[in-house]
Amino acid sequence: MDRRTLLVRGLAATVLTGLSEVPLRQAWGRPADYAAFLAGVRHEALGQGLPAGVVDQALSLCESPNAAVIKADRHQPEQVLTWAQYKDRVLTEAKLSDGLQAMTEHGEQISQIGGQYKVSRGVIAGIWGLESAYGTRMGKFSVIDALVTLAYEGRRAAFFRGELLKALHILAQEGMEPRAMMGSYAGAMGQPQFMPSAYERFAVSYPEGGRPDIWRNQGDVFASIANYLARSGWQEGGIWGEAVIVPDSIPQALLGRSHVRPLSWWVRQGVRPRAGRFADTSADSAAMGAIIRPDGQGGEAFVVYHNFNVIRRYNASDFYALAVGTLGDAIT
């Protein structure tokens, strides 16, 4: 047993009695506080029935709070981007070119999985591209180390402690090596960037059977994304939305996701599709949609349907959902 495991187990013996959680905002220069926190996590994990060997091996990766994780968490960009700026940042020529190449290699499998789950192949590809640049950028942090640090640091301690315990359950259930569980500084894992709670709910293997590997197995990645969307209410055959031209006479107050009306009503107000015709519905149909114009008058506008809100279940951002839909359409 190595020194770090002995430290965790030894301190546990002295601080576990009655220990539930160490105060949140802690003195970073006091190793005893951090060790006591680890002992508290260990106590809780063992109380949930997790094997001591799994817990000790995982927590042995956490010698001290990870300064890089704290820096990333506390210094997120403060700039409020417009949609045009966000689009330029995430939908680069390289992202589009790489996406076309990725679809050449994996498009058939994505189509098969999309068909099985009744989810658009474009949205699967769009999420894959945005989350991990088609599996090439999954994060370089140990998920356990990152979650321990964020649970200890205290800004969202309860949330990250819950995710940490779920990550420990995954290690125990799936027989994973803790060092192989890599992801972002916030604990998002693998190519779909699932938090541990999302992994437990939505990760699946493809074909069925075996442990879902969202780090290296593209079939599992695509099926897990598709399963997430299907269980979030994706409507088969429906699109997420499309670009439109909105007359300046329509006030901004009538726009936004909450203002859902029949498409025929929007057409009567002068809304027109940029592509010449609406993608999958006629002007006098009963299709319901909302108009969003993120940058206000003069900016790009879109009519968005039910499936747009399903994409937002993956990431609750209009910009994200627009980027996923736009990227998926472009590369498929």
Image (cartoon, rainbow, N blue to C red):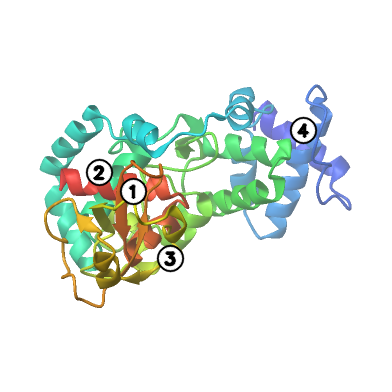
Q: In the image, 121: left or right of 265? A: left
Q: Which residue is mark 3?
A: 259
Q: Nearer the viewer, mark 3 or mark 4?
A: 3
Mark 2 or 3, nearer chain start: 3
Query: Badge 1 local density, few (<14 within 10 Å), some, or many (20+)?
Result: many
Q: Which residue is mark 4?
A: 34
Query: Badge 4 local density, few (<14 within 10 Å), some, or many (20+)?
Result: many
Q: Which residue is mark 1?
A: 322
Query: Is label 2 in contact with label 1 (beta carbons under 8 Å)?
Result: no
Mark 4 or 2, nearer chain start: 4
Query: Badge 3 local density, few (<14 within 10 Å), some, or many (20+)?
Result: few
* Residue toward you, 165 or 186: 186
Above or below for 117 versus 126: below
Residue 287, picture quadrant: bottom left
Query: Is label 4 in contact with label 2 (beta carbons under 8 Å)?
Result: no
Does residue 127 appear anywhere in the picture? no
Q: Which residue is mark 2?
A: 327
For marks 3 and 4, give the CA distance.
Answer: 49 Å
Mark 3 or 4, nearer chain start: 4
Q: Secondary structure at mark 2?
A: helix
For marks 4 and 2, give the CA distance.
Answer: 43 Å
For marks 2 and 1, give the CA distance.
Answer: 8 Å
Q: Secondary structure at mark 4?
A: helix
Q: Amino acid at mark 2?
A: Leu
Q: Amino acid at mark 3?
A: His
Q: Position of residue 158 (x, y in %)?
A: 70, 50
Disc on res. 278: none
Q: Amino acid at mark 4?
A: Tyr
Q: In the image, 269: left or right of 163? A: left
Above or below for 269 versus 301: below
In the picture, which quadrant includes the N terminus? top right
